[in-house]
């Protein structure tokens, strides 16, 4: 088995090093079946006339009826998808695949006033940056939004999203779907993924790129990669009341300088364990102009990479012992030597350069997809625990981490196809794996106790997608409560699936019906940004506010704002060179609507929207000074400028709010100095 | 007629001054009709089983089949919608209403690399700002995207979008759907709208807020509003080869300090005329904390505002005479006194505070909707020309502009409903008007030659929308070639139409089928941003590139880039403290992938994506230095940083591009100074 995988993998690396392997031909546009047209002509069903007129095949007509959500009705599920390097989170409805919302996180959003003049958002972005001479980050690469869990099930409370570009974790409340905090994780420059533990005690974030974090000035030459660069996994205590990371109760575990990739926290039989995929155990560093192979060759030399198995409850105890940790940049770190000495981590060989590590609903099996191996590998948690207990090792890595016997831990291989990446699960004992190269979703059966032994680990169906699927997702997959019904394929390329709108193509989200014995692609949805991964939950779990619970509410702290102004209490206060405007907004005027300052004044705007009606959001768009606030009903929002240039600057409500919205205006008058 | 309108309007102002007039009740969710369920049980049609299972009414099932666009097929039309204060343009497919693309214009977009580290985008944003001590603008309020016209019809070449927040005009190419330039119009701080002339000779932009542009330091106290503040209409010469505004061939016309709102350029019988709505001819300035009425009261005192009718070809000739113009901030301006002396402009009374001014397809009638008047008003261009010729005036405004006789210019009133805002047209002699207060779209017939005299100017149908519609749009409306078939209602509020996702609600785009005698709402689509207005054209008009025409292409200039690097020519060049990286990207590596610099170096990255395959976009996400480039196949993109902080900074491809995408990485090593 392993030999075969290796040969195939090497062949594929050679093929992949070229550029021409993608499906680039035009989509075969289905033509209406003759049968359908004939039927329409004879049945007299009024719907058949439309089907005929629009040239829909029977399958297409069925898909139309299965995906349409009538005006005024709600979708069954929402999908929280990452926006990738848009730095935001996208919320889609399923089955309509309508984009219901975007949540700005790491990048400003002028419409929502996020980072576009809002003092609070500016502070969140500033705090969530590297600092020490580096610019405030105005983007992030948000790959894997994670919804908070209570006892292993979605609770509709929080979303976290980590940032591959800067090693950060952002917290979003599902009450108002706004970002509350961004935490820059010390000692790492990157992460790919962060997950909640089964009861949201921790957000666990593994670094992707290693970093010489403990070297002087954070620098070590690339030649010292093996000695000085280190990976890291961060156990960040999550305060689920405040929706904040608590650094003082968090700790980190130093890892070898591999690329640590996706991860999953155990549940049930795997409770207390944490699994991380890795790649580049070769420790290649590139150097194409320096006579070395490029990374995609250098990082694909070895047959296997290592699945990291961490006993995190044991690590949590070790982290409490000051003798066993060091503190670097304010964070407790368990050094690699201690990891070895305390037996906190074991490796399991895994097919090289894997993408997905997924846990079946009950927590019994870890599914790994080595993208250069045409199989998925299922590891038994029971066997892993046994191999650890029996010290059934086949060696150690260069840093002394014991490597468990592959044969002792593997439960099954399933030959699913080329380029397997990720697996999700329904509630009926099936797994679904994406295949980047084959452009397929393949359905297979999980072994006992999900299916009888002779029915388990078998491919039972496959469906083509378009094109080059990365992640896929199903409602409640990778939790204790999967709902099944749909899979969404998050395809990376769309090629010719949508009308030509320039060289930047959208990605393609394909909705797949998995409710029957045969999977069926229902619809194509182009997506803005790069929805890397997602989570899906029933719409009934949503418990969001539709207006803020009181007038004068601070969306950031989710408490009454100290800067709130009630109607009738509006005023303009000058103190030295600072002019503070404590004002209100109500259809269709600002109070005050004329603000007179002098050139050079600092002007602080505290605006409270005193509306209580659902949907009565107002804006504060100030000409010239680059400010636009979006002020939801009940909210207090703040902005601050220095009135450097004299002139008459209009401001106006940017959110069309009433028939007299166009009159919802005011003036900031900046009198010249002399 | 006028008296009735006045009484009704005053009543409405009183009502609107309150806050509680919106439809706030829950949507009445349609229940499946008994008939449909019964039918499904008996017909044996497989589609009926789905209809029954999903509880669709017959109308809903029909809508599903009318709006569904099967996987891999294209929509019939694209809608270019503004993103409002998102500062971008949204592209939707019709009838699926799928969001096909967003085009970043005034605000950065990390996904597309626009303003997120790209040197070129940064320069476009910088040039397109006020300057003189004001910050670089990173948002805009893009209300009315306009597609370029050739002889009055869409040509699929360019889009312009003006910015209400800063008086700017941006040009987007429909070859690559990217922004090419942003032009800050001198002497204005705002605009609401800009339109192409019939053959795209000019983009004509009227200011919304007046400005004391010709006062010392650009400032005049609000008390000098009447004397010193001026509105402006800018005739900006459009170079359709380069896609740029040509300031030297442009001119401005000074206007009274009213709020000039929407506008339309004539065609056919109205060729050479330009029409602008106005509001606040009261010249109210607010002052709610200073004992004055708020703007929505102050600006609604008079019965009528003034439709501005400008003879722009005559103005163009006057602008060429230096004796008749002044030059302010580099722009030729025709002063208000010259406007009067040369008879360049006339007013026509119009129902107060209008929103829409629209021109029927042949150019014979101007349709104005005073939002406080329950009628729409149709003015005859022939009658306007006659009244001008005969000097049939009913007075002059305070600035000496002659006011044409209302009775002599009006052709018809149509009583359409409460809160009429905007009108669009099909190709069969019908107009469609949105009503903000009634939440309706009302269909009416245009008079001769579109319909016989006895059939014209009649309401023929109305349909309810949800809720509070602003603009509406139909394919090719306000051009010489309307296509009919659909109207999209751009509704401002969605209230409870979508699942609760926080206090900021989406807007609601409703697709209406206008192909039959009765209009029918087909679908609801939540929208991100604020799609204020839009333009719709058949997908066949698109002629976009799907990859750049050559490797090393500069998307900004649309020519070969002087910074392009061909494969095999990659190098790193140091010159003093500047390190220039001339590199390439090709699945799945950067050349070079290791870049060594010293702390304090300026580093210039010139990256060329040497791919030629459709959809093979790559990214350059650089940790720590806040850079993310999106580099389309063939494109050369540039970024520049100062390497202030030492460390090992990974960079990686942010656009998932191949099975070895995760290996598509590199290192920027910043060695400490000492």
Image (cartoon, coloured by chain):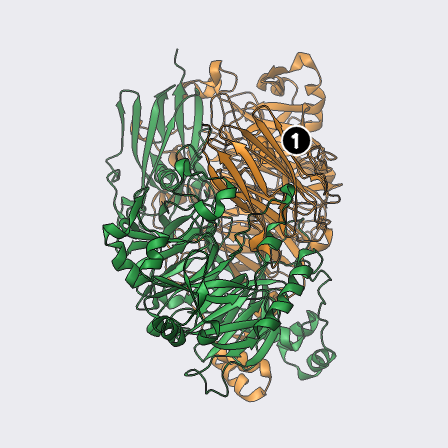
Chain colours: A orange, B green
**Rendered residue at 67%/58% (across/down):** B495
Give the residue number, with chain letter if any, for mark 1: A387
Name the one closer to the observer, B522 or B362: B362
In the image, residue A61 sits, relative to residue A250, either above or below, namely below
Q: Locate residue A366 relative to residue B611 in the image: left or right.
A: right
Q: Position of residue A60 (x, y in %)?
A: 53, 71
**Rendered residue at 71%/80% (across/down):** B41
Q: Quadrant of residue B197?
A: bottom left
Q: Quadrant of the C terminus of chain A?
A: top left
Name the one closer to the observer, A372 or A195: A195
Q: Locate residue A55 relative to residue A45 in the image: left or right.
A: left
Q: Locate residue B71 relative to residue A485 in the image: left or right.
A: left
Q: Position of residue B377 (x, y in %)?
A: 51, 72
Q: Is residue B388 visible?
A: yes
Q: Locate residue B245 relative to residue B473 in the image: left or right.
A: left
Name the one closer to the observer, A666 or B595: A666
Q: Is residue A140 visible?
A: no
Disc 1, SS = helix
Q: Position of residue B155 (x, y in %)?
A: 33, 65
Q: Quadrant of residue B565?
A: top left
Name the one closer to the observer, B382 or B36: B382
Q: Chain of mark 1?
A: A
Q: Residues within 10 Å of mark 1 (few under 14, many from 20)?
A: some
Disc count in the image? 1
In the image, residue A123 sits, relative to residue A222, either above or below, namely below
Q: Position of residue A534 (x, y in %)?
A: 59, 47
């Amino acid at each position: 088995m392993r030999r075969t995988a290796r040969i195939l993998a090497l062949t594929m690396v050679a093929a992949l090093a070229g550029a021409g392997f993608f499906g680039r031909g035009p989509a075969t546009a289905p033509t209406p079946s003759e049968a359908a047209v004939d039927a329409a002509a004879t049945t007299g069903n009024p719907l058949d006339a439309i089907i005929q007129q629009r040239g829909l095949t029977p399958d297409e007509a069925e898909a139309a009826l299965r995906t349409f959500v009538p005006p005024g009705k709600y979708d069954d599920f929402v999908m929280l998808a990452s926006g990738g390097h848009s730095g935001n989170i996208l919320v889609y409805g399923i089955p309509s695949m309508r984009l219901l919302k975007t949540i700005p996180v790491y990048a400003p959003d002028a419409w929502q006033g996020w980072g576009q003049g809002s003092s609070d958002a500016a502070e969140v972005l500033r705090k969530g940056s590297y600092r020490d001479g580096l610019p405030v980050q105005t983007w992030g690469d948000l790959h894997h939004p994670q919804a908070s869990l209570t006892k292993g099930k979605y609770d509709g409370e929080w979303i976290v999203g980590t940032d591959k570009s800067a090693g950060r974790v952002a917290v979003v409340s599902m009450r108002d779907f706004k970002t509350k905090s961004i935490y820059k994780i010390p000692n790492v420059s990157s992460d790919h993924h962060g997950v909640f533990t089964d009861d949201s005690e921790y957000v666990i974030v593994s670094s992707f790129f290693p970093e010489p974090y403990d070297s002087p000035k954070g620098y070590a030459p690339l030649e010292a990669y093996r000695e000085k660069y280190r990976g890291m996994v961060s156990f960040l205590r999550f305060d689920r009341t405040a929706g904040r990371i608590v650094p003082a109760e968090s700790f980190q575990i130093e890892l070898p300088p591999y690329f640590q990739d996706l991860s999953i926290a155990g549940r049930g039989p795997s409770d207390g364990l944490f699994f991380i995929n890795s790649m580049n155990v070769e420790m290649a560093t590139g150097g194409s102009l320096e006579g070395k192979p490029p990374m995609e060759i250098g990082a694909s030399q070895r047959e296997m990479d290592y699945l990291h198995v961490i006993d995190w409850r044991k690590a949590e105890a070790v982290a409490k012992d000051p003798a066993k940790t060091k503190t670097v940049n304010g964070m407790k770190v368990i050094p690699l030597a201690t990891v070895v000495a305390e037996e906190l981590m074991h490796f399991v060989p895994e097919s090289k350069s894997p993408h997905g590590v997924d846990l079946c609903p009950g927590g019994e099996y870890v599914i790994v997809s080595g993208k250069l191996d045409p199989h998925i590998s299922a590891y038994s948690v029971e066997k892993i625990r046994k191999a650890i207990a029996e010290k059934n090792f086949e060696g150690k890595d260069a840093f002394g981490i014991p490597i468990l016997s592959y044969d002792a831990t593997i439960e099954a291989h399933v030959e699913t196809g080329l380029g397997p990446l990720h697996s999700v699960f329904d509630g009926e004992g099936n797994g679904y794996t994406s295949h980047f190269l084959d452009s397929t979703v393949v359905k297979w059966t999980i072994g006992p106790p999900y299916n009888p032994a002779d029915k388990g680990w078998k491919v039972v169906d496959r469906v083509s997608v378009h094109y080059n699927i990365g992640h896929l997702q199903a409602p409640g997959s990778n939790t204790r409560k999967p709902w099944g019904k749909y899979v969404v394929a998050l395809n990376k390329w769309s090629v010719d699936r949508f009308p030509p709108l320039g060289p930047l193509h959208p990605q393609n989200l394909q909705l797949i019906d998995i409710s029957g014995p045969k999977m069926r692609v229902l619809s194509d949805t182009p997506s803005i940004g790069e929805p890397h991964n997602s989570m899906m939950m029933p719409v009934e779990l949503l418990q969001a506010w539709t207006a803020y619970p009181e007038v004068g509410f601070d969306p950031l702290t989710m408490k009454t704002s100290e800067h709130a102004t009630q109607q009738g209490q509006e005023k303009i206060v000058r103190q030295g060179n600072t002019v503070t405007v404590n004002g209100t907004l109500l259809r269709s005027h600002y109070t005050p609507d004329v603000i007179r300052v002098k050139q050079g004044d600092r002007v602080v705007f505290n605006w409270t929207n005193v509306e209580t009606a659902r949907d009565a959001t107002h804006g504060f768009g100030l000409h010239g000074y680059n400010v636009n606030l979006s002020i939801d009903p009940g909210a207090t929002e703040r902005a601050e400028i220095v009135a450097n240039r004299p002139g008459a600057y209009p401001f106006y409500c940017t959110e069309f709010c009433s028939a007299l919205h166009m009159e919802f205006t005011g003036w900031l008058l900046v009198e010249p100095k002399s």
